Amino acid sequence: MSSSRVGLRLAACLLNVSEAGRKYIVENIAKAALLDKNGKKHPQVSVLNIFSDQDYKRSVITIATSVDKLGLAEDLVLHVPGCSVFLFGEADLPEKRSLVQRRKQLGWFTRRDFSALQPDLGAAPSQRCGLTACFRAL
């Protein structure tokens, strides 16, 4: 008899990648998000969608995982050097700020010097591009 998954709390992760033309880069980042710190696949992590916009040269990778696996962000930082992780929603403890609140607080769309930002995990972004990840408990 298999165990019931009713009541499983999920978290969504949106990986924003400043790349759309080189599909293999985006796919490698998506594959890296599925791995734990030892390079083995997380059994409770799934890539739900990869959307690439050629005109804006960006991609968004949507990942779902168990709330218990929010260590996924730490593993992602290990497998994709230079990425920045900003938590929001239930993952942003104790404040639980929304994505809009986090972006306003960071000055994400008006800021010119991104090196001063302090992400929750990973390196400070050098500009508003590269790879950033936002985690939200559902």
Image: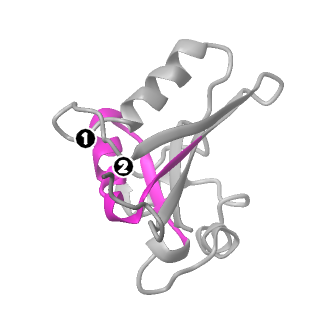
Q: Which residue position holds label 2?
A: 123
Picture quarter containing residue 104?
Answer: bottom right
**Closest to the observer: 10 or 27?**
10
**Residue 48 lies in magenta, yes or no?**
no
| Amino acid at circle 1 | Asp
Query: Which residue does the image show at 45% across and 22% down from the upper left?
Result: 28
Left or right of 64, for residue 120: left
Q: Earlier in the sequence, mark 2 or mark 1?
A: 1
Query: Which residue does the image show at 39% across and 61% down from the upper left?
Result: 4
Query: Which residue does the image show at 44% across and 49% down from the upper left?
Result: 84
**Residue 65 lies in magenta, yes or no?**
yes
Quarter of the picture containing the C terminus is bottom right
Whole-percent x and y of residue 35?
30, 35
**Closest to the observer: 128 or 30?**
30
Alpha carbon distance from label 2 to label 1: 19 Å
The span shown in magenta is: 62-88
Whole-percent x and y of residue 14?
58, 49
